[in-house]
Image: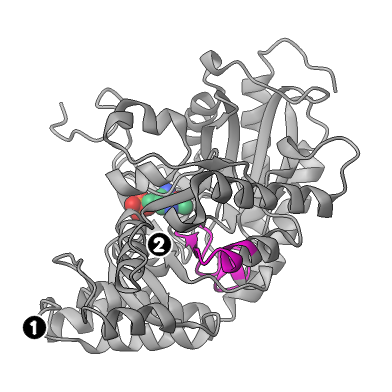
Amino acid sequence: MTHVFHRNPRAELPVAARGEGPYIYDTSGKQYLDASGGAAVSCLGHSNSSVAKAMKQQIDGISFSHSGFFTNQPMEDLADFLVKRAPANLDRVYFVSGGSEAVEAALKLARQYFLEKGETSRTRFISRRQSYHGNTIGALAAGGNQWRREPYAPLLMSVPLISPCYEYREKKNGETEWDFGQRVAGELETALLDTGPENVCAFICEPVVGATMGAVPAVKGYFKRIREICDQYGVLFIADEVMCGMGRTGSLYAVEQEDVAPDILVTAKGLGAGYQPIGAMLVSEGIFTTIVNGSGFFQHGHTYMGHPVACAAALAVQHYIEDNDLLSSVRHRGAQLAEALTSRLGNNPFVGDIRGRGLFQGIELVADRMTKEPLDPSLKIHAKIKSAAMAAGLMCYPMGGTIDGQRGDHILLAPPFIINDGHIEEIVDKLGTVIDEIVGSLPSSRA
Ligand code: PMP
């Protein structure tokens, strides 16, 4: 009997005993290839000795000093590292312990920024349908994932939702990719005018959507238009890179590939690669100086912000990635993985779409490839795929997202940046077999 009360207390989970590179071993010695990095966390794989050494060194020095009393060297060094590589305007870093905390901080900072500027009516946020920004009350409110919001809806601020830039489902027949991007970006202007731009603090979205859609990048030109609209109405743009940031898509920050700079960027998962829980909010100099010249400080904070061991771990992770040129590997291995997935699964009648960027790849399963009709949610195909993959020694991240109020199924892959040819083969072989097995029992679809 377990006394742990996490998600489903009835689920019988294996006990993780040790990790080595991209593999996790349970207490029975069974090996699992971590093709999802947990939930896009473990970008270095497991048991990286240089990260362990940096953490030990930090613990031997000082394991905790409260940020209200002291700064600490790894926190200072990590902030320097992140800012030097960030879009030019992002100059200041606020450290937290994870993604939801980073999003909460961003929402509150946006509000305080406008208060300091005397634009006191700005209290609203705009986001997109089928989005997820975290599970705390503010972050949950900011997301458009109906299934997660529903039980808490009376507690959540109301957030206007626009269409995501989800080409597979939202692009109309005959519409060019460019026109599609401009149309869905244009919905932000409509939502702003409906809400009253003078009432809006910020627009928040993921540059490449993770958990709710399965690795969906925006089409070219979309983010440039989003940036223009935000500028035109004096609204901040918050990029949520909790999942897609820190190299996952082949550049340190995913938004770099869109050629725009957000006002606030939040990141977490890959920052500490799971060696420690850590998140960060990068903030533009303009926001920072407005706060400093106003009330003088950001009225927020958490006990563990800038935790020295978490910062030491994250710094070692980021140096390891840079020293070993792992972002090149992400681009190269990502292309290889996408190609192998397409050749193994591209003709499967239940595979509607394979998409992604870098080592962030998604497979969308459908009942019918012609109509793109989602699988019947009651079949819980995503859950069956997860269990069958675990039985086969493969970790992948299948999710039932929300498609127009209906739940659809996709599988997210986010393997460690250190994977080689053999690992890619193993991922595709095992996943292919699992998908064949699970969807093989369904009535056949029109190809
Ligand atoms: N934003 C995004 C885009 C995420 O994917 C997640 C976590 N899946 C969060 C925020 C919340 O992060 P955390 O679970 O670390 O609180």
* Relative depth, front residue between 284 and 296: 296
Q: Position of residue 336 (x, y in %)?
A: 74, 58
Please state which of residues 414 and 387 is positioned toward the viewer in this rendering: 414
Residue 351 lies, in percent from the top left, at: 73, 31
Of 236 and 331, nearer the camera is 236
Nearer the observer: mark 2 or 1; the answer is: 1
The residues colored magenta run 229-255
Q: Quadrant of residue 438?
A: top right
Image coordinates of residue 410 in percent, x first then y, are: 60, 35
On the question of residue 218 being in view, the answer is yes
> What residue is shown with label 2?
46
Residue at point 71%, 68% (across, down): 332
Q: Quadrant of the C terminus?
A: top right
- Whichever of callouts 2 and 1 sits on the residue coming sooner in the sequence is 2
Query: Which residue occupies 55% across, 39% down?
Result: 129
Q: Is residue 286 above or below residue 369?
A: below
Image quadrant holding the N terminus, namely top left
Residue nearest the observer in this picture, 206 or 213: 206
Residue found at the far left of this picture: 69
- Element on which disc 2 rests: loop
**Disc number placed over residue 69 in the picture, else none:** 1
User: Does label 2 point to a residue whose CB lies under 8 Å from ligand 1?
Assistant: no
* C-alpha span from label 2 to label 1: 33 Å
Where is residue 10 drawn, in percent x and y? 27, 22
Q: Residue 182 lies in magenta, yes or no?
A: no
Identity, as a three-letter code, of the amino acid under mark 2: His
- Residue sitting farthest toward the right: 174
- Give yes or no for contact between labels 2 and 1 (Cβ–Cβ under 8 Å): no
Q: Amino acid type of disc 1?
A: Phe
